[in-house]
Image (spheres, rainbow, N blue to C red):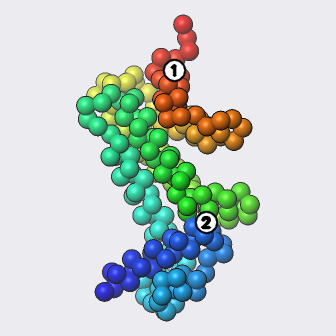
Amino acid sequence: MAIDRKKMILSAAERTFASFGYKATTMDLVARLANVGKGTIYTFFKNKEELFNEIMNQFIKRIKATATNAIHDDDHFFVNLHRALYSMLELRKEHQLTIKLTQELREIGTAQAKQALANIEDAILGFMEEFISHAELKQEIKSCDPKVTAFVILHLYISLIFEWEQRHQPLSKEEIAHLFELYLVQGLKK
């Protein structure tokens, strides 16, 4: 029973944060949407920030699971990396809560929104760094600094998926894979 109520509260809170953002969400709104008394929320979470952090932690686990599911042992490192990255960034791009947090950060600059989005990026970078280190050990790629490599690759992807389409037609998944191959696998040098 308590687990069901906690799940109901988390579900209602996620919808509330996704609709109103961190700043405008109140425990009263969450309680109303979850159809519980505000006191019930406080039996599971001491404040709004703890509730929000639990939702963000669950989302980060979902991102990592999405990336893990995109990796197939019999595929080449770069194919797996592209598929994992694309799936993580698509999930982030389409998830209503991250959309609202990005909007809130841009319009208001809420510290909690900024931190939540940074935590998502750190989780993606951590996953990639581990994946790159593993590929390096298996000698699938050249020796490199996995932390820097993860950062460069992620920001190339962010540029191609999010920033490019702000001024141009969005690139297809295949076009992004081709550019990934050109810039990172083959290189531009003749």
Mark 2 surroundings: few (<14), some (14-19) or many (≥20) residues within 10 A: some
Say which quadrant the N terminus sits in: bottom left
Identify the amino acid type marked 1.
Leu
Q: Residue at x 38, y 30 (%)?
A: 79
Q: Nearer the viewer, residue 132 or 21?
A: 21
> Is residue 63 shown above or below 52?
above
Vertical position of residue 20 compared to residue 94: above or below: below
Residue type, label 2: Gln
Q: Bin the neighbour count of mark 1 within 10 Å (Cα to Cα): few under 14, some 14-19, many 20 and up.
A: few
Residue visible at 45% across and 40% down?
85
Q: At x 36% / y 34%, what residue is drawn?
A: 80
* Quarter the C terminus occupies: top right
- The mark lying in front, picked from 1 and 2, is 1
Who's the residue at 61% across and 76% down the image? 25
First-in-chain label (1 vs 2) = 2
| Secondary element at tag 2 | helix
Residue 156, position in %: x, y?
A: 57, 34
Q: Residue furthest right?
A: 107
Task: In the displayed orientation, state which residue is furthest to the top.
Answer: 190
**Distance between the alpha carbons at the discs numbered 1 and 2:** 37 Å
Q: Position of residue 66 (x, y in %)?
A: 38, 50
What residue is pinned by disc 1? Answer: 182
Residue 42 in sight in this render: no
Q: Is 175 situated above or below 190?
A: below
Q: Which residue has dot 2 on it?
A: 112
